[in-house]
Structures are given as structure tokens and as C-alpha cells.
Amino acid sequence: MRVSKLFTKTLRDAPADEVAKNAQLLIRAGFVYKEMAGVYAYLPLGIRVVEKIKQIVREEMNAIDSNELIMTGLQRREVWEKTGRWSDETVDVWFKTKLQDDTELGLGWSHEEPIVEMMKQYVKSYKDLPVSLYQFQTKMRNELRAKSGIMRGREFVMKDMYSFHATSEDLAAYYDKTIEAYKRVYDRLGIGEDTYVTFASGGAFTKFSHEFQTVCDAGEDVIYLHRDKNIAINEEVIDDAVRELGISRDELEQVKTAETGNIFNFGSQKTDEMGLYYTGEDGKQQSLFIGSYGIGITRAMGVIAEKFSDDKGLVWPEAVAPYAVYLVSIGTKGSEEADRVYEELTNAGIEVLYDDRNERPGTKFADAELMGIPKRLTISDRGIESGEYELTVRSTGETKLVAPADLIDVLR
Amino acid sequence: MRVSKLFTKTLRDAPADEVAKNAQLLIRAGFVYKEMAGVYAYLPLGIRVVEKIKQIVREEMNAIDSNELIMTGLQRREVWEKTGRWSDETVDVWFKTKLQDDTELGLGWSHEEPIVEMMKQYVKSYKDLPVSLYQFQTKMRNELRAKSGIMRGREFVMKDMYSFHATSEDLAAYYDKTIEAYKRVYDRLGIGEDTYVTFASGGAFTKFSHEFQTVCDAGEDVIYLHRDKNIAINEEVIDDAVRELGISRDELEQVKTAETGNIFNFGSQKTDEMGLYYTGEDGKQQSLFIGSYGIGITRAMGVIAEKFSDDKGLVWPEAVAPYAVYLVSIGTKGSEEADRVYEELTNAGIEVLYDDRNERPGTKFADAELMGIPKRLTISDRGIESGEYELTVRSTGETKLVAPADLIDVLR
């Protein structure tokens, strides 16, 4: 991509009402546009980060045999009434709307109920189990406050997965498998070391559910952490959990975190409520066990932006960066050479954002830093004379000289 | 993909209230699930078709230098009031909702206004023009009736593109370029020959706009067609158009069509209303010219399903088929060989849906036909003995024998 063809511009200032660091940086660098509090459009650079995060999650969910689909935003009242979750008193984040004939509809803030309802069409017998489904869905949640930028949106992208099992043992095994898949996701996103499987409040079937909490100063949660024993406990269940685990609260460190994922064992409560059963090998009707597993895609992007940034701007980990290389041309010969190198790298499958604008080097360098592209490649008249390009690593600021012949190897 | 891992099942019957052929077939074949009238979930097979259509459109929009982004579903009242399009009297398809503080919001049925509003941040000078943007967005439209399956959804996927220009001449040139890009899209989707650039009602700036109308018995539009002269006119402007073009109405054939795309020249009306201007080379404030260009992604899928189907089911064109090959194994040796061939084809990059179920051949063949996968490859015990696989083309029903060594070449 040529910067000259990118319609966004870096901005000196974020909107005055934007208090979250992630959104301030993402707006200034041209990744997102604020439509209203908690509601952001994703611009060309931003959509590339979203898609990279989605692709990592997609690969790991496919690897545990989950099927991708996409449910609907518009929701029927009858479906949610079956579990008592239609009422605004029970669920305080509904956006509601109406058809022209006054039929009330909701906007999906979660999809457990409609997925269970749908599966009545497809799950009849033990032969149809187990099955796992997931989607990347734009969720709408009518949050009272939305001050954490893209970390808490009123409209945001979530990966939600649902698994259906004949026995609680089979569900438990898949639940554990999903924990491992999630760990791989966070590792690949570059936040694995700071993300903890955390005990959180459970439901009718299990004492605890599990959250994935990522250490982050801007997070809205507090967890208690034992780094050596790799134990993490959400504040909300700290009393129960220390008792259960036989540890002392004094051993635990209190840290601020953002919930980047959660997994929940519903047992057969929801399926029983909604009337989804299967016929066992013995021909008898049996209860069906389900789990639900979420990863906040845009929230993860916000957390990464918070954690990987400095006073100059964003510092994307390579796996989610919108482009791998920011190519800067300086001078007339530099531009000609950069045109050629841009083609060459692009043809080699390296993703390059090429700053071909007629701007001062300082402006180009500052934009490269604000956008947080992992590597900056500078081709100048002077460099061409000495037969060297300059390669600067965003995260460390280190610069080294690279001979043109070695370039592709160095960048791969 | 193994059919045994696909959670959907083909159904003998579509829901009784589903009157549209496209939805009947897509539901029976397991591509979509009906949530309510005009609101469909896209299941694993369906989402693959949607993504293939999107990718074709994406490539053609990128080729005319448009930038992909994604705007928001939630919409602010103030933005739409600037052009008088907030009122339910003016726009009768709004879904409205409310924040917890009672602020009224709308759900995006189109995105012209928010895009123009956003561009105030990025377009200041003639140097920032021209620019073109597009998105794949889930639109919500509160349609009074929704009886055409996925051809008219209350929730549906649309590609909408917007271009911004310094002069009306520059807009006109891009408008023409987009017509050519759209023709390439419809050609690649397999409906190019039946899709006509059609005169439709214009606006303040132009006498006519252009629709892309695809001949389709289930379509909701009527156009007048001169096939030899390649002239198509929407019923709504027939009187004006025949006069303008100097042709006789008697020469024209009346056909039913579905509007699969439209392009509209807004001139500077909307930008003037909303206060988006640019500074010219002379330092003076100038009006800005915009065009808007839509393609109904899920509607196009519905039209393709309507047009390419027979009494046995769907017949996808190769470019949008969820899989290229439906692999059927028959017998014990057949299954072992099919396992091996499935791996081999998948590794060669050929998309295979492998029916590895323990079902009768007739059941597998019927599902292959209902799902409309372009080629069916049958590997049976008998075939292995004679050293041949059976390859059947869905569209023609023709079967030929293929030697294992030639398989990949034949399928590529």
C-alpha cells in the first residue's frame, strides 16, 4: 500500500473527549474513527489488524474442529424469554428495536440462546454429537459507560464459540482443549506471557468459570496473582477460591487486568430450559451439555495497543501489525530505488506500507513510529551511493545497515 | 472438510412459511438458517459462499484503488438530520433504538451520511482528492415485507463504496470506471451475461442513475430490455428514457429482474448539505462531488441460487461454490482410498467436501446434488479394482472415468 493512496492522515491530537490511551493512539494513527462513545469505525489500517487477530483465532478454533458460521444481529423475544434473559431487569445491556408491525426485537449482545434454539434443527441423536460452532460477530451492548476506547465497546467484534456434548465428561474434555487453544491464541497475539487463566464466578453446574485476564493498567478488572504457581483469581471469587485452593491471600499480588477471553460450562441448564435434547443409544431422551467460549477481538486489539506503545506511538507485535515494513524514500534516486524495492518486496509476499509522499524525512519517520509498523526501511540518495539501506526496528529503535542483496532474507 | 464433522444436515423440507425458492434450497442444503422473515444466519457452507463473493468484489474494488474499511451499525441522529433523512416519514426502513440515557440511535440501513461526516476529518485540500472507500457491512432495513428469502433481507450484507472528487468530471470518470469494475464482478460471479446496466431514476444532479439488474424470475423489479442494442431501462423511468434515447417502447422486451447493484451520482448536493468542502489550489473553498456504489452481497448469492438450480438442488458456479469437489467414498477399500485422495487434493489446494459418512451411495449422491458442488468424485471398491474414479459434473450430469494419476490435472 502506498501512503499516498491511504485516505487517512495521522492526527496531532485525539478528540478531546477520548480518555482511553488505546483509542487516542489508534485515532491519531488513523486506525479507528470515533462515531460515538464506545462505537468506532475501523479504517484501512485498523481493519487489517482486526483481520489478523481474527485469522489467528480462526486457525486455532478450526484446529479444535469448530465450524465457522455467522448468526444474526436481530433477535427474537420468544427465544430469550425461554431462559428469562429477555427482560431489561435481568440483562441490562440490551438494545431493543421494533418491526413495523410493532414486534419487539433485540440486538444480539450474546448468542447462546439463538444458537441453542437453532441446534434443535440439527442435533437429534447421540450420533450428531459432539459439535462445536463459532462466529465472529458484531455484538451490540447498551453499556451505561464506555470510556475504555475499543476495550469496552457498545458495538464490538467478538469471537464466540459454543460446544454441544452428550456427557458432562465430554464437555469437560473439550473445555480443557479450548483452554489450550486459547493459550496458543494469546501466545500468537504477543500477550501470552501476561495472560492468565483466572478463576471467576461459575454457574449452576460449576463452582468456577474461567476468564483469560491480561495484565494491563487500563484494564477494568482486578485479579489476585501467584506468578510462580501460575494461579490467578478474579476479585469477585477471591474468598471462595483461596479456601478451595488452600492458599493464603498474602501470597497473592493484586494486579489490574483486562478480560480478553472467558469460557463457561453451562452444564445442561440452558439446553434443559430451552428444550434441546438428544436421543441416546438406548433410544431415550437425554440432557445435552454445552460450553460457551468468548474472545473479544477488538478488545484484544485495544489491549495490545495499550501494552505495546510508547511516547512515540503504537508498537505492534509482528503477528498483528497491519504491515510488516514501513518503507521510507528520501531524495530523487531514493524514490526511484524505493519504487523498485516496493514492487520487489510486495512480489515476495512481504507486506509493505510505502511512504511515497513528498514529505520531509522527519514527518515520515514520525508517522512510521506513530503507526507502530515493526520495521522501517529507509532508502536515501546517500544510502544508494554507499550501497546500503537502513533498517530500524520499532520496538528497540535499533538501526542496522543492510545490503540490497540481503534485504529479502533479512525481512523474512 | 469432512461431512461427518459438518454439523448441518440436509433437510427434506424447508420451513412451511418459506416461500422463496432461494431460501428453500439454501435452508434444505444447510447453507442458511432462518431466524425470522428476512433474517438469516449463514452456516458453514453458506459463509463460504458469502466470503467467495466478497473476495471477488474486494479484488475488483481494490483494483480501482478503493480502500476497505468498516463503519458502524449504530448511527447518530444529528448526522442524518443534516440531510433530512433521520425522519421515519422520509426513510421508512429505519430500525431505531436508544442508549440508556434515552439518546435515540439508528441502525445503519445505508452509510452515505456517516461516511461524509467522517471525511471532514480527512479531506481538507485538493491534494486529498480523489479518494474512494468501501466496506462490507451488515445493513439493517426495517422492510414491511420480506418474502424473497435472502434476496431481500431485513439484515443483509452489502458492499457499499463511496468516492470523493474535486470536480464533477473526475467523478464522472470514476463512475464509468466503476461500471466496468462492476461488470467484471458480475462476470466472475457467473451472472455477467444476464446482468444489465439499467437506467433508473436519478437525483438533483443527473437525470438517471444506474442499476445493475440481473434477469431473474424471482426478482422484484421489471425492466425493459433491448438485447441487441444492450439497452435496459427500469420501469420507473421508462417514459423519460425512451424519449431521451430515441427508441420505441415496442422494440423493448419486458423482463423480471433483481437489482444486484446500483451506482449513484450525488453531485455536490450531499456534501454541501453536510458541510464537507475542500480548499482548492487557489486557496478558495470548493464544493466536493461524491458517488455511491452498492452491491448486495447476500442478494447476489440469492440470485445465483435462484438462477443456478434445478429439481435436484443448487448448482453453484465454480467461482462461488463452497467447495470445488464433493468426494464420495463407497465400500471399505473405497473409503481407505478416499481418505488418501482427500489428503492429496487438500494438500494440492483443491477445496474438497469429503462425504466420509457411513451412508448409502444414493444418500451421498442426493446430498452432493442438493448442495450443488460443481464436481462429484466417486471412489468405490469396484472403481479401485478397475483403476478408475468417477467424476460427475453437477451442471451437466455428465460422468467420466479418471485415472488416479490424472486426477489433480483434471480437477485443476
Image (spheres, coloured by chain):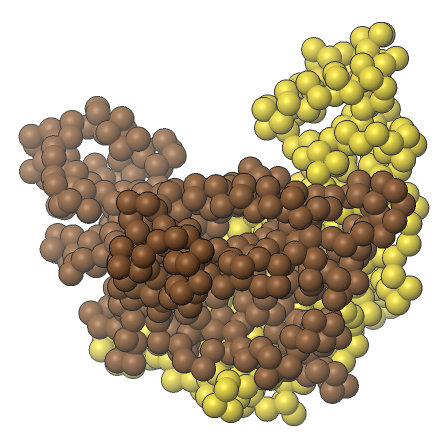
Chain colours: A brown, B yellow
- List x then y, in percent, for residue A262: 49, 57
Q: Residue at x 58, y 63 (%)?
A: A203
For residue A212, which quarter of the picture? bottom left
Q: Residue at x 30, y 31 (%)?
A: A412
Left or right relative to A80: residue A361: left
When the figure is inspected, residue A104 is found, relative to residue B136, above or below; the finding is below
- List x then y, in percent, for residue B37: 78, 70
Q: Residue at x 79, y 43 (%)?
A: A126
When the figure is inspected, residue A205 is found, relative to residue A81, above or below; the finding is above
When the figure is inspected, residue A131 is found, relative to residue B345, above or below; the finding is below
For residue A311, which quarter of the picture? bottom left
Q: Nearer the viewer, residue B21 or A245?
A: A245
- List x then y, in percent, for residue A208: 51, 58
Q: Nearer the viewer, residue B367 or A301?
A: A301
Q: Residue at x 21, y 52 (%)?
A: A368
Left or right relative to B361: residue A301: left
For residue A63, which quarter of the picture? top right
Question: How many numbered marks have been drawn onto this rendered protein structure?
Answer: 0
Specify whether residue B251 is in view. no
Q: Nearer the viewer, residue A189 or A390?
A: A189
- List x then y, in percent, for residue A161: 59, 53
Specify whether residue B384 is in view. yes
Left or right relative to A37: residue B211: right
